[in-house]
Amino acid sequence: MNFVRVIDDFLIYIRIHKNLSPKTVEQYERHLVKFLWHLVPEISKFEGKLVDHELVFLESPEDSVKRSQKNILKRFLLDNCRLELENVKISDLNEFRLHIAEKGLSVKTVNAYMITFRAFLKFCRKQGYESIDPVSVDLIKQKDREVTFLDAPEIVRIFEQIDTTTIRGKRDAAIIECIYSTGLRISELTALDKSAINLDTREFSVRGKGSKIRTVYLTDLAVDKIKTYLEARRAELGEKDTFNSLFIRHNFSTDNVYSKSVHGNDVIKKPLIDADVRLSRFFITNKIKEYALRANIIKEISAHTLRHSFATTLLTNGADIRAIQELLGHASITTTQVYTHMTNSKLKEIHGKFHR
């Protein structure tokens, strides 16, 4: 069976039949195509340019140009890749593992590749194809996970760095408070639409990993900050605020809500759409790092740090570990238990109070 054909079939299977999230499908595709390039480097270029793997397999039904490009590139691979699935051996996979490890990738990232290959090979076996036994794909043993979190005074110091007299400052304060009060993942936050949040009931549903839906809850402070931001946004944009995104960029002129694209010598102006203004994970993470740096917090900070801080705050204040698991959207309690070692001082205090 042609290796490219099997990759295509697998990605269709996990997208349609397994209903995995677009981000998961994209990650699986990226891993498999990098392995393909490693095995058959001569097909990694098309017309003298590196092939963009996202145009090969991921469908873009809303964009006929991308759909056409994808089909051309896929045909190129099918016509030029002579690699058969049964000829891919475990030694090839181990060599690729060494290759990516030598590039400085973390153990967690290397294992993510191996998890992709396991899923792919399980699919191959299920289809009756001759392939590597997925059981033979081992994961590297990882050290106990270390989690960085912020305590209450550090959270306060971060908020002190935000200029809330500006609309961007109001937005940033709302974002940070929203993550800290709900424990949202950064991908869940960036996907939020205004219509998804009920500020009256202070709760809303999010679709997390594995497309699992859970309910999260806002604090009064988070509601106030979100309301303050949305009011400022309405005042600035008025009827031009047709965007669904809860949090948007504000680096465009309110008198000229357009994007520009150049075709030849012509400049074409198009109305901004939601995708043009929705904040990216990269943008939000950098903003949080910026405020932490200003607050002189010497820790490796990311948006996920606020999620860790949310969980740690709940645990140290007596919340049940199972309840925290539900709020975080963890499939396994083992994942949540990483926070328990961080609350040893609180446990020691309880032990001293109640055990004589």
Image (tube, rainbow, N blue to C red):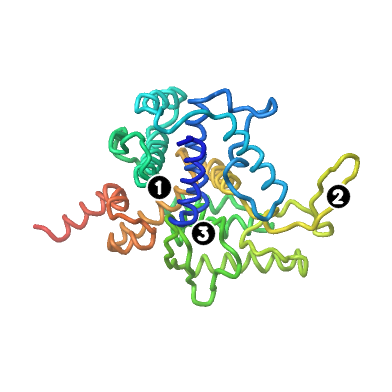
| Residue 156 visible in the displayed image | no
| 90 over 255 or under it: above or below | above
Where residue 71 appears, as percent x and y from the top left, is 64, 43
> Secondary structure under badge 1?
loop
Residue under circle 1?
Answer: 149
Q: Depth check: 84 or 348 in front?
A: 84
| Three-letter code, disc 3 | Glu
Tell me the quadrant of the picture where the C terminus can be found: bottom left
Q: Residue at x 74, y 68 (%)?
A: 235
Q: Earlier in the sequence, mark 1 or mark 3?
A: 1
Task: Depth check: give the residue in front, 64 or 289.
Answer: 64
- Which circle's residue, 2 or 1, is located before the other in the chain? 1
- Crowding near the residue tagged with mark 2, few <14, some 14–19, many ≥20 C-alpha atoms within 10 Å: few
Between circles 2 and 1, the one closer to the viewer is 2
Vertical position of residue 310 compared to residue 232: above or below:
above
Place of residue 77 in the rendered image (x, y in percent of width and height, measured from the top left):
58, 33
Which amino acid type is marked by label 2?
Answer: Ile
Q: Residues within 10 Å of mark 1 (few under 14, many from 20)?
A: many
Query: Marks 3/2: CA distance?
Result: 39 Å
At numbered mark 2, what does the secondary structure look like: helix, strand or loop? strand
The residues tagged by marks 1 and 3 sit, at their Cα atoms, a distance apart of 15 Å
Q: Residue furthest left?
A: 356
Q: Secondary structure at mark 3?
A: helix
Q: Residue 59 appears at what percent x and percent y?
A: 60, 49
**Around disc 3, counting alpha carbons within 10 Å, would you say few (fewer than 14), some (14 to 19), or many (20 or more)?**
many
Q: Is residue 351 left or right of residue 72?
A: left
Residue 150 vs 73, above or below: the answer is: below
Task: Say which mark, if any, is on residue 177.
Answer: 3
- In the image, 198: left or right of 102? right
- Residue ID for mark 2: 268
Q: Are marks 2 and 1 in contact (CB under 8 Å)?
A: no
